[in-house]
Structure formats: C-alpha cells, structure tokens
Image: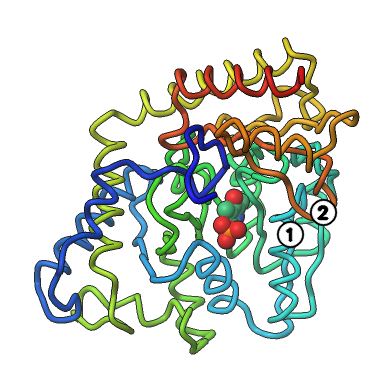
Amino acid sequence: MKTYRIPMVPGPTSAPEPVLAAYTVNYGSGDLEPEYYELYEETQSRLQRIMGTSNSIVIMSGEAMVTLWGALKSCLKPGDRVLCIGTGVFGYGIGQMARSVTSDVHFVDFSYDEICRPERAEDAIMSLRPKMVTMVHCETPSGTLNPVAEIGQLIRLHGVPLFYVDAVSSAGGVPLLTNEWAIDLCLVGTQKCLSALPDLGILSVSERAWQVIKEVRYEGYDALGPWRTALSDRWLPYTPSWQAMAALHTACGLLLDEGLDRVFQRHADAAQLCRRRAKEMGLELFPRREEYCSPTVTALKVPERIGWAELDRRLRSAGMVVGGSLEKLAGKVFRIGHMGTQANLQLVEQAMDVLEQMLRL
Ligand SMILES: *Cc1c(COP(=O)(O)O)cnc(C)c1O
C-alpha cells in the first residue's frame, strides 16, 4: 500500500500540507536567483536554532546518508585514527563506512539495548588518541538516546580534534546543543523529526572541521569543501532543488513557530504515552532500561507467539504501519516512530488502540 491512515514508521514521517505544497511551485534556477540564496540563508539560521549552533550549516541534495558519507570522506585521510562509539546499527555502520577511507578504525563496544557509558569511551579516547570520535545521538533501530553532552566534555578535556555526531533522528525532537556539546560535524536529515521529504542532507561544520576539510581536499559529489564559500561566492557545486529547500524552510518554520520547548515536550509526552500503553498490553521495551529510551521512537520486542511478519500484516490490514528493525534486530524488534508530526497524542493513542486489538486477535 502507498499511504496509511496511521503512519508510525520512524522516518520518513508523514509530511504536513504546507511542506508538501512547496513542491508544487515552478521555481526559477536556484543557481541564478538571489531569492534562492536568501532562502538558503534563512533556512540555515532556522536550523542553527534547532541545532543549537552558531557553526555554518551545509544543506546538500541527497538524503541524510550523503552527510554521513561526505563528512567522513571530507575529514579523513588513509591512516587517520577514528574511534567509533558503537551502541547500535548506525554507530557500527558509521565505523564500517569510515573503514572505506582509513583502516585505523576502532570501536568502543556496547550492546544494542544499552547506551554509551562515558567512562568506557574515556578510556578508549585516552589510549587511542583518535583524530575523530563518532557517535549516534538517537540510535533509531534500537530506540535509544546516547549521552552526547558527556562525550562532548571528554572531547574538550582530551583535545580530540573532531567530534562527529549523527543526530538524524533526534534533531527537532529533543534538545540538541551542538556548540555546547563540542560537536564539529552534526549530521541531520529532513525526513525524521523535521517531517519533510527525504531529499536533503544537513550538517553543521565547526571552524576546526573546516580547517581539516581544507587540508584533506577530498573531491567528490558529497565533498564538503565547496560549501565553505558557496554562499558568500554565490557559486553552488551543483543545481539545487529549490522546492526541497522551500519545504525544509517551511518545516523548520513550523517547529520554531510552535516553540522548541513545546516541540520537545510534545515528543516527551508522546513517548511516555506510547510506553505506558505498550507496558499495559504486556509488551516489553527493547532497551534494557526505560531511561535509555529516546523521546522520538519506541523499540519493542516482537511477541514471539505472533512473530514480526504476522504482526506487520495485521497492523497493515488495520491501516497502520510501524517500523521493523534492521540487521541483528530484524524480526525481533518493532518500532513506533512518534517523531515530527507523528509526536501527536491523539495519533499515538489511536495507534496503541489498534496495536492492542491486533495483539488480541
Ligand atoms: C534515518 C537515519 C539515518 C539515515 O538513514 P536512512 O536509512 O537513509 O534514512 C541515519 N542515521 C540515523 C540514526 C537514522 O535514524
């Protein structure tokens, strides 16, 4: 099926009308018109507020993965040492991606139902002295939220040159303090808490990251280098999607108009409701402890007597769709995405009613 009455997938989330409307306009060429650059700059400053940063914001065509790749390739050279904090599918995936650039990649290992314990990360930082530490804020496939602030303190304390954080499914749903947390490369997507379409990659780049990027001189479609002066020189590396930028501008505006504190509270409330109902119907959270859970997504164990394929079939037949999970969690964990427009108490209540009915069949 193409669309669902109760969309609860943890991204892409359902986009609101004003965001979709941005795609129905025949804009001129973004390269040529001053209005496009104004739109870009205004979108940048909206994202700076959502991401808690004064660093420059790059908005590239593609999707969140383009920034995950682009930031690694633009900042790393063969031989560079990277420490990846692994607490789930994306944390380990980023390490595998980094291995395509440098063989010197190390992991601090945690199991997928835990979050990062800073003291273990600190030991690894002190013994390895990496050029870059990578971590994931919300590990979407396991529904956990990592303590980025604490790791940021260690980055400062031990003088790690680059801190790379995947905040794709947390930005716009939970507080994200890029500057305060010493994040040099903060990676965000449009299709999770921002509830826009999956067509742009967003990242903030610190001054020290720009210096590294200049020195590494990576060239490629996903290279960050050209973006350092793209706006000031009015010269973009490729034709941008004006429609996608207009949609992102609108999506950020909706969050800021609502007020970020309210937006974060809405996510916390939706998460709490989802988890209370899940526990009442006898479901078990996947994360080992409830305080590890992210306000943007809830990961639950698939009841063994039903199995994932059957649960998915039953929910779809009732007009509801949730996320399965990935990799070694596939078939064992399912996820309810209460992020962006889906962080809505009425919708979550309705979803949990349907889930309860479908478990009883
Ligand atoms: C969604 C997401 C991404 C982007 O992955 P896609 O599967 O391409 O959408 C990256 N990191 C995290 C943590 C995500 O949740």
Q: Position of residue 341 (x, y in %)?
A: 41, 35
Mark 1 packing: few (<14 Cα in 10 Å), some, or many (20+)? many
Mark 2 packing: few (<14 Cα in 10 Å), some, or many (20+)? some
Q: Looking at the image, can residue 163 be seen?
A: no
Outermost residue, top side: 280
Q: Position of residue 226 (x, y in %)?
A: 36, 82
Q: Position of residue 338 (x, y in %)?
A: 53, 32
Outermost residue, right side: 305
Residue at 79% of width from left, 75% of height from top?
104
Residue at 36% of width from left, 57% of height from top?
55
Q: Is mark 2 within 8 Å of ligand 1?
A: no
Whereabouts is ligand 1, in terms of quadrant?
A: bottom right
* Count of numbered marks: 2
**Please, is residue 247 above or below residue 222 in the view?**
above
Helix, strand or loop at label 2? It is strand
Residue 334 occupies which quadrant of the picture? top right
Q: Quadrant of the C terminus?
A: top right
Check disc 2 and report the residue beneath it: 108
Q: Position of residue 56 (x, y in %)?
A: 34, 62
Residue at 59% of width from left, 39% of height from top?
321
Q: Pointers 2 and 1 in contact (CB under 8 A)?
A: yes
**Please, is residue 317 above or below residue 182 in the view?**
above
Identify the mark at residue 84; answer none if there is no mark. Answer: 1
Residue 113 occupies which quadrant of the picture? top right
Q: Along the line of sight, which residue is nearer the eye, 131 or 40?
A: 40
Labels 2 and 1: the sequence-earlier one: 1
Q: Amino acid at mark 2?
A: Val
Q: Is mark 1 within 8 Å of ligand 1?
A: no
Helix, strand or loop at label 1? It is strand
Q: Amino acid at mark 1?
A: Cys
